[in-house]
């Protein structure tokens, strides 16, 4: 089942497929563990899925499996962080945020403890596991909390960079990863990753597509399709949802006059909502949004679900055409 999902995103523009973002995270976590002996990892009995098991295999005395008890997981993480440890706590995105939100709120965000949270299996591209396993509201919950930084990298190389940046950041951070193998938007070791600073991946004067996670590759593909019809689209990888890069958004609004956002998350409280808030306050322009529209998904292959719920390059193209008339 792990390798069953086959994605089409990015293939028409020649993007090679690399590891799932959770795999890149797991490898980088081991690297960080070798460099910093104060790092400890706590998992909710899903280490084989979050890939924290790799850290556990290398550093068993610094790896703790608390079982299927996410609230307890967060409590232990907060306690260890208060005692001076560099703590990473991991589970499925939906288990972490749906089951342990109060503990994250009062045990990490309120005291501003530098706990790093990693939620895997985010979005609907996890496929056959179905809606009970899909994190589709996690960005909304994470960004709602004061003091939290929220990272949604696009591919394996950017996830490695995001993981390093997360541990270098002095404060609570949520890193969102996925199950499916992803198109390689960046080259290994050549990722310009700065928390709060979007990456401009493509120039364009007619519209800007702002995307995060898996949808960055879809945005690049959409930009190519739009170019074939005479529309030049700028593409921004908004890998940091909070703090969001306001200056990149305002510049895009002023220079291209229209913005479409794309995310593998509910539209309520996600990337699009964060961008719209900046646009409304600083540079009102036409906008459109690609994401889950007030619905849970169902079980199916990742590609089938992305197509059914409108999260493909063609859906981004349609969103651009709608606001351009």
Image (cartoon, rainbow, N blue to C red):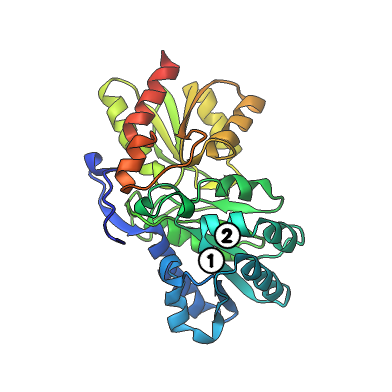
Is residue 307 visible in this depiction of the protein?
A: yes
State how many labels appear. 2
- Percent across and percent down for residue 15 are 26, 47
Considering every residue shown, the one lying at the far bottom of the view is 61
Q: In the rendered structure, which disc, 1 or 2, sits on the residue that comes first in sequence?
A: 1
Q: Quadrant of the N terminus?
A: bottom left
Q: Residue at x 39, y 55 (%)?
A: 129
- Percent across and percent down for residue 238 are 50, 43
- Could you say whether the residue bearing mark 1 is in a helix, strand or loop? strand
Closer to viewer: mark 1 or mark 2: 2
- Along the line of sight, which residue is nearer the eye, 98 or 175? 98
Considering every residue shown, the one lying at the far top of the view is 325
- Along the line of sight, which residue is nearer the eye, 59 or 195? 59
- Along the line of sight, which residue is nearer the eye, 281 or 303? 303
Q: Is residue 143 above or below residue 32?
A: above
> Where, by quadrant of the figure, is residue 204 drawn?
top left
Relative side of 287 to 204, left or right: right
Q: Residue at x 41, y 31 (%)?
A: 234
**Which label belongs to residue 287?**
none
- Could you say whether the residue bearing mark 2 is in a helix, strand or loop? helix
Badge 1: residue crowd in 10 Å (few <14, some 14–19, many ≥20): many
> Where, by quadrant of the figure, is residue 173 drawn?
bottom right
| Residue bearing mark 1 | 90
- Along the line of sight, which residue is nearer the eye, 231 or 22? 22
| Residue bearing mark 2 | 96
């Amino acid at each position: 089942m792990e390798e069953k999902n086959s994605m089409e995103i990015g293939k028409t523009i020649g993007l090679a497929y690399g590891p799932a973002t959770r795999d890149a995270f797991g490898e980088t976590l081991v690297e960080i563990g070798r460099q910093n002996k104060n790092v400890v990892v706590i998992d909710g009995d899903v280490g084989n899925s979050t890939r924290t098991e790799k850290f556990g295999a290398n550093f068993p005395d610094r790896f703790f499996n608390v079982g299927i008890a996410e609230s307890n997981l967060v409590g232990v993480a907060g306690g260890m962080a208060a005692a001076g440890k560099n703590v990473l706590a991991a589970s499925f995105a939906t288990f972490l945020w749906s089951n342990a939100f109060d503990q994250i709120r009062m045990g990490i965000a309120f005291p501003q403890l530098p706990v790093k949270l990693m939620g895997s299996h985010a979005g609907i591209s996890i496929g056959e596991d179905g809606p009970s396993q899909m994190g589709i509201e996690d960005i909304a919950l994470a960004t709602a909390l004061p003091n939290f930084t929220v990272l949604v990298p696009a591919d394996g190389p950017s996830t490695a960079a995001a993981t390093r940046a997360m541990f270098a950041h002095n404060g609570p951070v949520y890193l969102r990863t996925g199950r499916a193998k992803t198109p390689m938007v960046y080259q290994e070791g050549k990722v310009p990753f700065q928390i709060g600073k979007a990456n401009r991946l493509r120039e364009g004067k007619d519209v800007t597509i702002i995307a995060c996670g898996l949808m960055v590759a879809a945005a690049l593909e959409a930009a190519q399709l739009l170019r074939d019809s005479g529309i030049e689209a700028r593409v921004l990888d908004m890998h940091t949802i909070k703090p969001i890069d306001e200056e990149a958004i305002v510049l895009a609004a002023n220079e291209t006059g229209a913005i479409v956002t794309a995310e593998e998350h509910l539209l309520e409280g996600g990337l699009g909502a964060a961008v719209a808030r900046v646009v409304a306050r600083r540079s009102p322009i036409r906008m459109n949004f690609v994401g889950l529209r007030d619905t849970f998904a169902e079980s199916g292959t990742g590609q089938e679900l992305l197509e059914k719920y409108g999260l493909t390059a063609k859906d981004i193209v349609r969103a651009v055409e709608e606001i351009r008339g």
